Amino acid sequence: MSCVLGIDGGGSKTICILMDDTGKVLGTGEAGASNYQSIGIAAAQKQIQSAIHKAAIAALKYTNTIKLVAICLGLAGVGRPEDIEIVKAIVSQLQNSKSMLAITWALQPSSIVICHDALIALTGGVGDAVGIVVATGTGSMVFGRNHQGNSQRVGGWGYILGDEGSAYKIAVCGMQGALKAHDGRGIPTSLVEDFQRHLGLENIENLIEVVYRRGWGVKEIAALAPIIDQAATAGDKVANGVIDEAVTELVIATATVINRIFDQSQVVEVVTTGSVWQGKCKLRERFVKSIAHQFPLAKVIYPRHEPAYGAGMLALKAVTSSHTKSGDYPSFITFERE
């Protein structure tokens, strides 16, 4: 059976979807992180291989033979020519692996798609590689692509230089608001007591020990964002100010993409992905209201499919497109800031 693979590789997990040539999902597999820039090339390859193997095993209930004719890898951090070469080498190693006996590899150069994870999130979320994805979880980034194939990224500069509107920035701003209130240079906020209770602190000054001396990283700090969300839901002014600032930044980034590559006279779908949108403080509703006010034809939607499914769609497109033209997808896709 001719099949394609769609792979969503990120900093926490790797999801693989195996589809037949009609788009039917035959099997899925999940493994650990595959961001090679964080864990190394060998470790990333191992996790990608594990996810593929699990998807192939799940697909055996439908077919005894899997002829793989296309693959799309949407990986976090892929955007430079050297990244493409590294991932191409990983694909080559996968084809030479003897541990996936259920798969017969029949890839052509034109059927290997390597792209940033933002494109597969857009493709899966919208159901097409045209539109905008506003991704905000631990970090944040906005990415758009129009019908002419022009793309635009805004944000994604990381927790030190960017990530406005992310869980990390919300958590940091919330802690800063609590400390300002404690100092007397900010308005009173329930966040002081909220952080103390959640972290088991005798007083808010002990945030110093938690943040600086326990070796906390971005993920641990970002995990505190729900505290601000809960306080904002309860009506705390400082917490709501933090949420409003996050919304403002996400709206600015989205507006930038719309203005750069879309005609405001055309309908554009904006898909929201990431944990921050799942809060209870109506952050998403605030975002939708602001976007609708500025861009009446922009339609904010929930994801229709997961990113790995979007990768599978791109792999299918690679099989059906004999050559690259306007609206099609090149065999190897990279995104430079425009």
Image (cartoon, rainbow, N blue to C red):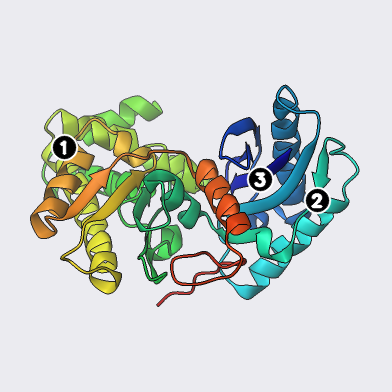
Mark 3 Cα within 10 Å, few/some/many (few <14, many 20+)?
many
Residue at (38, 62) in percent of width and height = 162
* Viewer-nearest residue: 300 or 237: 300
Position above or below: 238 against 129 = above
Residue 81 disc label = none
Mark 2 Cα within 10 Å, few/some/many (few <14, many 20+)?
some
Name the residue tied to disc 3.
4
Q: Are marks 2 and 1 in contact (CB under 8 Å)?
A: no
Name the residue tied to disc 1.
189
Mark 1, secondary structure of its residue: loop
**Label 3 amino acid?**
Val
Residue 190 shows in this picture: no
Q: Position of residue 132 (x, y in %)?
A: 33, 56
Q: Position of residue 163 (x, y in %)?
A: 37, 57
Labels 3, 2: front one: 3
Mark 2, secondary structure of its residue: helix
Q: Residue furthest top?
A: 61
Mark 3, secondary structure of its residue: strand
Residue at (83, 52) in percent of width and height = 95
Position of 227 with respect to 210 (left or right) is: left
**Label 1 amino acid?**
Thr
Quarter location, residue 196: top left
* Viewer-nearest residue: 127 or 307: 127
Position of 135 with respect to 316 (left or right) is: left
Name the residue tied to disc 2.
94
Q: CA gap, disc 2 to disc 1? A: 54 Å
Q: CA gap, disc 3 to disc 2? A: 14 Å
Q: Position of residue 86 (x, y in %)?
A: 72, 65
Q: Position of residue 207 (x, y in %)?
A: 38, 41
**Label 2 amino acid?**
Leu
Residue at (83, 44) in percent of width and height = 104
